[in-house]
Amino acid sequence: MSRAGTRIELRVDRPAHGGWCVGRYEQQVVFVRHTLPGERVLAQVTEETSRFLRADAVEILDASPDRVTPPCPFAGPGKCGGCDWQHASLEAQRRIKGQVVAEQLSRIAEIETEVRVEELPDTPDGLGWRTRVRFAVDEEGTAGFRRHRSHEIQPVDECAIAHPDVNRLGVQDLPWPGVSDVEAVVSDSTNDSAVIVQPRGAKLPSLPKLNDSAAVLRRFKGGRIQSVRGRRSVREHAAGREWRVSAGGFWQVHPQAADTLTSAVLDALDPQPGETAVDLYCGAGLFAGSLADAVGAEGRVMAVESHPQAARDAAHNLGDTDQVRVAQSDVIGQLREWWDLRADIAVLDPPRSGAGREVVHALSELRPRRVSYVSCDPATLARDIATFAGLGYRMVELRAFDAFPMTHHVECVVTLARG
């Protein structure tokens, strides 16, 4: 008989990747949300598998000293699934994230290290930072956020971690009939904004009037964007340049992340004039542009991006930089074409799924002296570090940044050295 829906009392101990804490009930592992290490809770089972239970803490019997009142009324059991740690102080959140990264490195890569998560500037309360927000829309046209591990939608009046300009767009206040999701994009540095809608069918519905002059665009299957009203990109300022970023493209969602991560990558790689650098998963070209400045006119930067529009953005953004070459290709295919390239340094910023064995092997054949690996997923990062280790690359530094306060996500920059 399934235990789903039943309530159990237990004490939780360590945090786990994904916003959980781990406890045991009758010798069975239980992953519990909305709790903190050391707490005794009454938890409601939400899911049962053959190996473990999932549950929500619905009553705190012994509270942790790190517990605080969530700043958002939509955070909690059965509500919005977007934030994982609103019930923890920011100091505790960073400590927990560091413990999770360290545990993944120990378990997967057999590396024992302490991890300190660094605060990013300008978000002392951990709120109001997210510049790209995707709203789900129900059959009645109400926009909100999905509940945790559910297709059900939690309507909201505003999002506590969204940038104020996102909330000012008023997406959550408007009806969206015939739309499956709405993405709101703003730039903290230029005040540009855009709203991207995904129609439920082939026909574009009548769109509501926004509280702003934002561009409204339509997303097609496969990620292609068609302009409906306004431009198809936003401008960003970072690393001393202006960047064109397609409305549906990738850019760091925390306003201070682009500058912070670029500085960390340059510190990790220590690029020298005349060197050859490789930038994998280059997006709009952020790291490639700074590497080009560092290696100078006598050096070169070889960048690759698989998404066609992002590659076009990178080529546009770096068109005045002669030493940069941007290839639109899948990364492993391009690395195979570069089989005879001798790289001095390399940076990669893959999606959450990580680079994978093939890419790591192909990159190692270019024999860069240093590699900077940027990742928002500690599990796939640890897996790829273990692969690098088998090819003669050791981790010499890890920096972690709290680029996603209130959530379980953490951005890491790992430095790998050959030999």
Image (tube, rainbow, N blue to C red):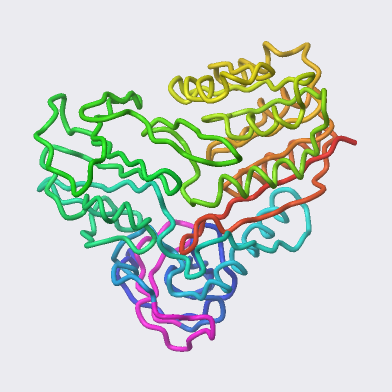
Q: Is residue 283 left or right of residue 157?
A: right
Image coordinates of residue 360 in percent, x first then y, are 70, 30
Q: Residue furthest toward the bottom?
A: 62
Residue at x-position 32% and y-position 46%: 134
Whether 50 is among the magenta residues is yes
Height in image: 212 above or below 19?
A: above
Camera-nearest residue between 228 and 220: 228
Magenta highlight range: 41-69
- Location of the N terminus by quadrant is bottom left
Height in image: 403 above or below 309?
A: below
Q: Quadrant of residue 230?
A: top left
Q: Is residue 233 left or right of residue 272?
A: left
Whether 138 is among the magenta residues is no
Residue at x-position 56% and y-position 45%: 258
Residue at x-position 69% and y-position 27%: 292
Image coordinates of residue 96 in percent, x first then y, are 59, 67
